[in-house]
Image (cartoon, helix red, strand yellow):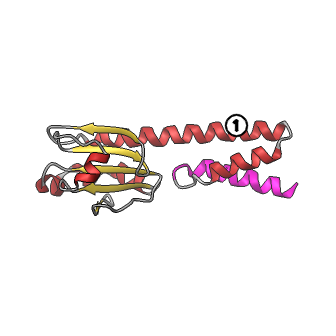
Amino acid sequence: MVAWKIVPPGATVDAPLVLFWVPSSPDELKRSPLLSSAQLAHFSTRCVAMRIVRVDDVRRAAQLEVGPQLPAVILTEGEGRILGRIDSEGPLNVRDVEDLVRGAIDRRTEEANALLDLARSHYEDGDVDSATEIYRVVREQRCVCPREARDADRALKKLKKR
């Protein structure tokens, strides 16, 4: 089961990525394949918060630019910038939702790898301070990019030994 939680109106969600789901009806909320997706359950272990938005939460619906077409799924960075959305007049396709989240995680992983390469380059050029700061940035993303964060942590430990 996916760890969906109903987000109370006005509450904040503290997570690197948030998947907001606005179901079209209570019946959909009980029967949707979004409830039992193994991929979505896995993504929730990588700090993707799964939140259900009540239809009467007008303020959050406005923030997420939810229109009259429901159901809808909106992926955001924390509670900020919208990264992607799926609006539907019928049942949501769980594969489309999984692909939306997977794409965001893949982009963050690519960005973390690019930062690791940049940090190595700074280190090879003798700029240890810049390399250290970049490694720390990557390490802070440990929940979304665990492998890259471990690499950054190992590099930071090596820098401390020198």
Above or below — where is 110 with respect to 41?
Answer: above
Above or below — where is 94 with respect to 54?
Answer: above
Residues in magenta, as a range = 144-162
* SS assignment for the magenta stretch, majority: helix
Residue at image position (43%, 37%) is 103
Q: Is residue 109 left or right of residue 94?
A: right
Residue 113, by quadrant, is top right
Q: Amino acid at mark 1?
A: Asp
Disc 1 is placed on an element classified as helix
Q: Is residue 111 left or right of residue 122?
A: left
Q: Nearer the viewer, residue 12 or 75?
A: 12
Question: Would residue 122 be counted in the magenta stretch?
Answer: no
Mark 1 Cα shell of 10 Å, populated few (<14), some (14-19), many (≥20)? some
Question: Would residue 152 be counted in the magenta stretch?
Answer: yes
Q: Is residue 77 left or right of residue 8?
A: right
Q: Is residue 47 left or right of residue 125?
A: left
Residue with the mark numbered 1: 117
How many numbered marks appear? 1
Residue at image position (17%, 43%) is 70
Q: Quadrant of the C terminus?
A: bottom right
Q: Nearer the viewer, residue 159 or 129?
A: 129
Residue at image position (34%, 62%) is 11
Residue at image position (77%, 57%) is 157
User: Where residue 17 appears, x then y in whole percent?
Assistant: 43, 50
User: Where residue 22 appears, x then y in whole percent?
Assistant: 23, 50
